[in-house]
Amino acid sequence: MLEELGRAVRARRCEHALTLRALSDRAGVSVRFLAELEAGRGNVSVVRLHAIASALGTTASALLSDEQAHARRPPVVALLGLRGAGKTTVGRKLAHRWKVPFVELDAKVEEAAGMSLAEVFELHGEAFYRRLERDQLRKQLDADRPMVLATGGSLVNDEESFSLLRARATTVWLQASPESHWQRVVAQGDRRPMQNRANAMSELRALLRERAGRYARAELVVDTDASKSVDGVVAEIARRVAPSAHASRMASTLAISTASSR
């Protein structure tokens, strides 16, 4: 029950675009307590729950019944990881297996911007990209439909987008070694990782170390290293997602959101 309440509070907070600090100030409770509550570990009193609900523009009873409302939503599963984790390959197979659309978030960002990602960064910078990414993510989630949504590998760096995704999707980190990331990207004919970069592998290792803690916040972690086939990874995700908290949302189809990392 506490886990369900935590998900409901986090979902409401993200829908109102509130940070933990902002909700803390409104409700008169500590940030640490809210973090524990959203993680399903906060045994909240009736008085505190009423204060939090009021700050979110709802009631305590509505928060307690929000999980039933979520059960009526079409599910979304998000695959996270660096470029070369296998998100696009695995995601397409998952989408085919569950007969749902496959959507790449970065492609939606390019459509909205009318230019490539490289041009977005070069002409407008990262802040502009993050705004577009957040808008497109919310648009896809608000569609309330099963899908395979591929998000960019750096989405976890944007706390607002990542919180929104975790609140409204089953997140799965496709974990792999730096060597596997490198080999897969090169096998796809992408030579960018090594162009004019003598320390490219060292940079990749550092990037993976830096993001690992964020990726690990995913609901599920699946090892995709070379010892596993794509079909094996797909089968493992299907097995582990089905009995999860989102199983009640799975009717005849299942939505998978995959992250095609940059």
Image (cartoon, rainbow, N blue to C red):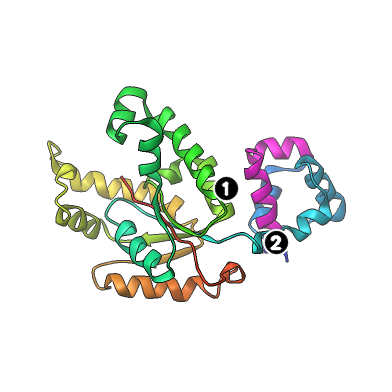
Which of 109/252 is in front?
Answer: 252
Q: Residue furthest right?
A: 47
> Distance of mark 1 from mark 2, alpha carbons?
17 Å
Which amino acid does the dot numbered 1 rest on?
Asp
Whether the residues at callouts 1 and 2 have beta carbons within 8 Å, the answer is no
- What crowding class fits label 2: few (fewer than 14 Cα within 10 Å), some (14-19), or many (20 or more)? some
Task: Note whether 79 is above or below 34 in the view shown.
Answer: below
Please give the name of the residue rendered at 76% of the width and 54% of the height, measured from the top-left corner: 63
* Span shown in magenta: 5-28
Q: Quadrant of the N terminus?
A: bottom right
Q: Nearer the viewer, residue 108 or 29?
A: 108
Q: Is residue 9 shown in magenta?
A: yes
Q: What residue did someone put label 1 on?
A: 142
Q: Position of residue 199 (x, y in %)?
A: 17, 42
The kind of residue tagged 2 is Glu
Location of mark 2 (residue): 67
- The mark found on residue 166 in the picture is none
Q: Secondary structure at mark 2?
A: helix
- Residue at 39 percent across and 71 percent down: it is 97
Q: Nearer the N terminus, badge 1 or badge 2?
A: 2
